[in-house]
Image (cartoon, grey):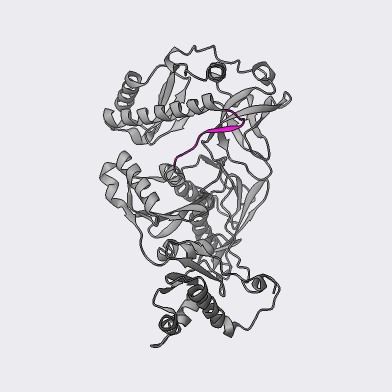
Amino acid sequence: MTSELVVDVQPKEVSLALLEDKSLVELQSEGVNISFSVGNMYLGRVKKLMPGLNACFVDVGYEKDAFLHYLDLGPQFNSLGKYVKQTLSNRKKLPPMSKANMLPDIDKDGSISDVLKVGQEVVVQIAKEPISTKGPRLTSELSFAGRYLVLIPFNDKVSVSQKIKSSKERARLKQLLRSIKPKNFGVIVRTVAEDKRVAELDAELKLLLKRWDESIKKVQRATKFPTLIFEETSRAVALLRDLFNPSFKNIYINDEAVYNEIRDYVKLIAPDKENIVKRYKGQLPIFDNFDITKQIKSSFGKTVSYKRGAYLIIEHTEALHVVDVNSGNRTKNANGQEANAVEVNLGAADEIARQLRLRDMGGIIVIDFIDMNESANRQKIYERMCANMQKDRARHNILPLSKFGLMQITRQRVRPAMDVNTLETCPTCFGKGSIKSSILFTDTLENKIDYLVHKLKKKRFSLHVHPYVAAYINQGVISLKRRWQMKYGFGIKIIPSQKLAFLEYLFYDADGEELDMKEEIETKI
């Protein structure tokens, strides 16, 4: 199996697509300026105590106050709170962590009102992003995640991932980290740290300690509440940190700055893999070039076809996700009904496991498989689903099929499910049902080109259109494109884009910035 990562950097968002044997299995997209992402830290203020829930609401700048439960405060919350208070009271000198007094752990059965009061400043970290009508979920057990290590302030423990099976290696890593970590800091050793040298682990530990120092300095300088005190330097690198696998064959990026950032990051964590990071310089949009756009449009609809006419119906509700398996137009004779059901269900198990990763569906998932009479066949479907879900990084639990043929899955949810609208709004009538004569579309484009060249004095630009329209413009020896170039200059490029609707168009200048050429009349038809 070959794994490739494709990074699409746009002015407003960064998208990462993970391909396994050219098939899209994971898609992550985040706004460049997005706040309230998992891992971000804030200096906030307690807005309201909820003794009945044993929780409180904290203002971190979101329209809905963030939720902080007593059990998410962490055992050493008192130590953290005292250190934050000392930091805020002394604006000139930062109290050293090595001399910080570690107070006793908070009572596990205690009350939120015994620890916090309204108006108190607290350092919190986003544990779950805002989902639906809920605000962010917070924790005060701070952590700084790296490739090999996770740094936890106000904790003296060294823990090693359970996935490292060798007792000798576990003992080596524990002893090593205990010898190099500073006082009052805990460390979790991740699975990928297995067999790593001291120098590599020490370098990352120093990097994580530097992040903590920078964060606490922002607390010291804070003049307003809430204040963002820690954010990943690069959204692309943050996404890559969780996705990166040494088995990657290629990583393609379409932006020079992000390419350099990711190359430096890969060089840091896996020096022998530096050459897999490649700069994409093609004219086609990067997702179109790797056939990702088409896969997105075919995989994110309500109906997903997967094998010889069989298909899935996927519905998202407030409480859970529902998947219905349909055999479609397959043969349904009396003798072969059981075998047909098993074949369709096995294919559905493969596709559903892919869909869960692709859409990042979390919470409760209920799957209605086609009924099977034999218990051995139901067990086969369960085992197939378990095997497929082993590739999933999110924590999950799978229950065997019930008597009603339903399978229940719970999957870790830290952010809203990926939702891509695959329906296209008519770009010329905007859903009103009537448009100008489509044969005049190329005349409209020529008028735009004329305006760009003669009025705005743009000599080099690209016109992005639907692939069918691009084929029409490029057809023939003396194509329409050639005639435009002869008339307006050879700086005109025609780029087919699969993400555009049939009669939609976009202009970009030589630097890749979009040129808004929409006329007022085009929005009022």
Q: Main secondary structure of the magenta part?
A: loop
Q: Nearer the viewer, residue 520 or 328?
A: 520
What residue is rendered at 44% in x and 40% in y? 233
Instruction: Please indicate, yes or no, whether residue 1 appears anywhere in the rendered image.
Output: no
User: Which range of residues does the magenta coloring cover?
Assistant: 223-233
Residue 262 relative to residue 435: left or right = left
**For the view shown, which residue lies furthest in the right direction?**
52
**Image coordinates for residue 436, horizontal then vertical, percent:** 65, 81
Res 502 quadrant in image: bottom right
**Image coordinates for residue 371, horizontal then vertical, percent:** 60, 57
Note whether 228 is above or below 74 in the view shown.
below
**Image coordinates for residue 73, horizontal then vertical, percent:** 58, 24
Residue 140 relative to residue 259: left or right = right
**Image coordinates for residue 36, horizontal then vertical, percent:** 57, 40
What residue is rendered at 51% in x and 36% in y? 39
Q: Nearer the viewer, residue 503 or 133?
A: 503
Q: Nearer the viewer, residue 24 or 464?
A: 464
Note whether 328 is above or below 206 in the view shown.
below
Q: How many marks?
A: 0
The quadrant of the rendering that contains the C terminus is bottom right
Res 425 quadrant in image: bottom right
